[in-house]
Amino acid sequence: MDERKQLFTYRNFQNIAKYYVRPFATEEEYQVTAAVVKRFGEGIGKDLHQKLLQRARTRRNWLEEWWLDAAYLELRYPSQLNVNFGGPAPYLEHCWPPTEGVQLQRTSISMWHTLQYWDLLRTERLDPHKAGNVVLDMDQFRMLFCTCKVPGVTKDTIINYFKTESEGPCPSHVVVMCKGRFFSFDAVCDGYILTPPELLRQLTHVKQCCEGEPAGDGVAALTSEERTRWAKAREYLIGIDPANKTILEIIQSSLFVVSLDDAKPYATAENYTPVTREALTGDPTIRWGDKSYNSLSFADGTFGSNCDHAPYDAMVLVTQGYYVDQQLKATDGRWKGSETVRPMPLPEELVFTVDDRVRSDVAHAKQQYFETTQDLQVVCYAFTSFGKAAIKQRKLHPDTFIQLALQLAYYRQHGRLGSCYETAMTRRFYHGRTETMRPCTLEAQNWCHTMLLPAASAEAKRKALLLAFNKHNKLMAEAQNGKGFDRHLLGLYLIAKEEGLPMPDLFTDPLYSKSGGGGNFTLSTSLVGYTTVLGAVAPMVHHGYGFFYRIGDDRIVASCTAWKSSPETDAETLFQNLVTSLHEMLHLATTAQL
C-alpha cells in the first residue's frame, strides 16, 4: 500500500471543520471547533502523523490490524445483533416462491451451489474483481468459509481454517443446527462434493432426529451474549468437559452453518420485511453468531443469512449470494444430475455436556437477546416506480441519487440533517476494506433546505441538486482512492492512545461526535450493489437508522432499521419519506435534464 495515497497532508485539516462539521454547528460552535482543528493540525497532530508514517513504513497496510481490533474485536457489547449483518436471499423472486414442504429439498440444492463456490475459491478459479481496469484485493474471500470469531475476556480473535488446494488440506464438514441441537457431516465423499440427493439424505436424517423430540440445550444462544460474559461462559463450558472444546472446534472450523428454522416469514418481492426481520432477529439457538456464514433455511422454502462482520465486508457474501442466485435461475432451481446416493456416514450429533450454570447462562443469553431484538424495528420494501435505468438516462449516478434522497427524507422527517456514514470500498489497496464517505455536506444541506422552501423555483432546486451531486461524487472518488480522512483520524487517535499520550482536544470536541466521529453516525448506510442480493444492519446509535439498499434496473429495494425505544425515529416513516424524495428528484431531473 502506498502510504502517500493513504495518509493525507495537513492542508486538508481545515477542510474537516469546514465541510463535515459545519452542517451540524451554530456559527459560534463552528468557530470553536475550527480553532481546535487548527491547533491540532499545527501541533500534536503533526507529531502523531509522523508516528503514523513511521508505522506505515514497516507494514504493507498500517490500518489492517488496528481496524480489526478497534472496529470489531475489542467491542464488548453483543455482536450478533449490533455488528452482524443479515439479509434475505432473492430466490423467492423467481424459481423459489414461498412454498411449504420443500425446505429440505431446496436447502440441499442451495447448499450444493454454495459448495461449488467454495470449490472455486479452494481451486483459485474465482475471477478477481475489478474497478474499471484496476484489480481489487480479494483477500477477504478467504474468510467466507471455515472461519469463526472466538470470544476473549478483553478482546476476541478470528480463527480461519480455510486453505486453497495448493496450501494444503481444508476442513470440508458443515454444521446443521435444528431445534437447539447440532449435527455435523462431511460435505465431501471420496474427493467429490455431495450431490443434492446426498445432501438431502443427510438433512432428512437431521430433521427426523429432531421431529417430535424436545429441543436441545440451545448452547448457540451464548454467542448472542455480551462478549466478556460469553468468553467466561465458554471457558466454563470447556472446563466441565474437554469434549465440549472438541465440539466448539468442529463448529468453528466448519465450512458454514446451515440453520433449519421452523419460521415461515412469507415475504414477497415487494415486501421483504418478514424474512429480513427473521434474518436479523431470529431464533438464537439455531445460529452461531460468531460464524462467518450462517445459511438460514426457513420452513416456507425461503432463505436468508446472518454473518459476523469482523472477518469480511458484505460484498463477499453478496458475491456468493448472487452466484447462487444466478445458478438457480439458470437451472430453474432444480437438480438435473444423478439421483444416486453413495453409501456414507450419517450426520453425527454434537452434544455439549451442560450443567445448571450453563443452562442458566443460556437462559440469560436468550432473555437479553429477545429483549433487544423486540426493540428493533425492521422494514424492507421494494420501490418499483423506477430504478437505475431511469436515473442513468438522466445522466445521474444512481448511488448518489439514493443518498441525496435519503438526506432529504431525513431532513423532511426530523427538521435537520443527520450525520451519515456511507461505505466507500478501498479494495484497490493491499488488504483494503472500507473508508467512510460522509454524504452530509454543506451542498446537501443547502439542497434539502431549498427543496422545502415554498418560494424556491424549480431552477434553484435543480442548481442546488447538481452542486450536491457533484460534491458527493467527488468525495466518494477521494474516499475510494485512499484520500478520505476518517481512517486517518482513527490512526492518529490510536497512535495517541497506544503511546499513552493525553487525548487531543479534537477527539473530545462535542462536534466531533455530533458530526458522526467515533462511530456516532445517525444514518449508517451502504449500497449493497446492483445485483439481486440485499442485507440489513442495526443502527449505529440509539437515535439512528441502519439503511442498506440495492439498485436494480427498474426497482430500488431498501432495508431500514430503527430502535423502537427511541422516540425520535421511525423506520416506516423514513421509507415513506424516501419514496416521496425519489419521486421529487426524478421529476426535477426530468423537467430539465441536469
Image: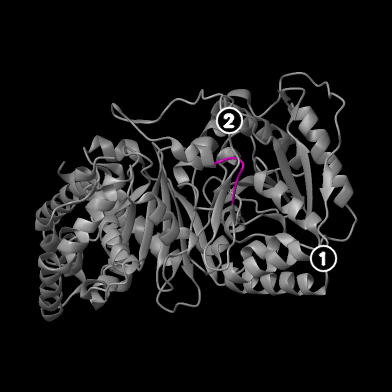
Instruction: Count neighbours of disc 1 (C-alpha within 10 A) and say few if under 14, some if 14 to 19, many if 20 or more.
Output: some
Query: Residue 55 — which label?
Result: none
Lateral position of residue 504 relative to residue 181, left or right: left
Considering the image in quadrants, where does the C terminus appear?
A: top left
- Magenta residues, dominant SS class: loop
- CA gap, disc 1 to disc 2? 36 Å
The part of the image, by quadrant, that contains residue 279 is bottom right
Judged from the image, the secondary structure of the residue bearing numbered disc 1 is loop
Return the x and y of residue 24 as percentages of the image width and height: 21, 72
Q: Is disc 2 surrounded by few (<14), some (14 to 19) or many (20+) residues within 10 Å?
A: some
Q: Residue at x 11, y 59 (%)?
A: 457
Which is more foreground, mark 1 or mark 2? Answer: 1
Q: Amino acid at mark 2?
A: Tyr
- Residue 113 colored magenta? no
Query: Horizontal and vertical percent for residue 253?
Result: 66, 44
* Image quadrant occupied by the N terminus: top left
Q: Nearer the viewer, residue 193 or 89?
A: 193
- The tag on residue 117 is 2
Res 172 visible: yes
Residue name at image x 11 percent, y 81 percent: 28
* Residue 374 visible in the picture: no
The span picked out in magenta is 144-148
Q: Position of residue 359 (x, y in %)?
A: 78, 71
Query: Helix or strand or loop: what does disc 2 sit on?
Result: helix
Q: Position of residue 20 (x, y in %)?
A: 20, 63
Q: Which mark is residue 354?
A: 1
In depth, the one of 72 and 466 nearer the eye is: 72
Residue name at image x 62 percent, y 57 percent:
289
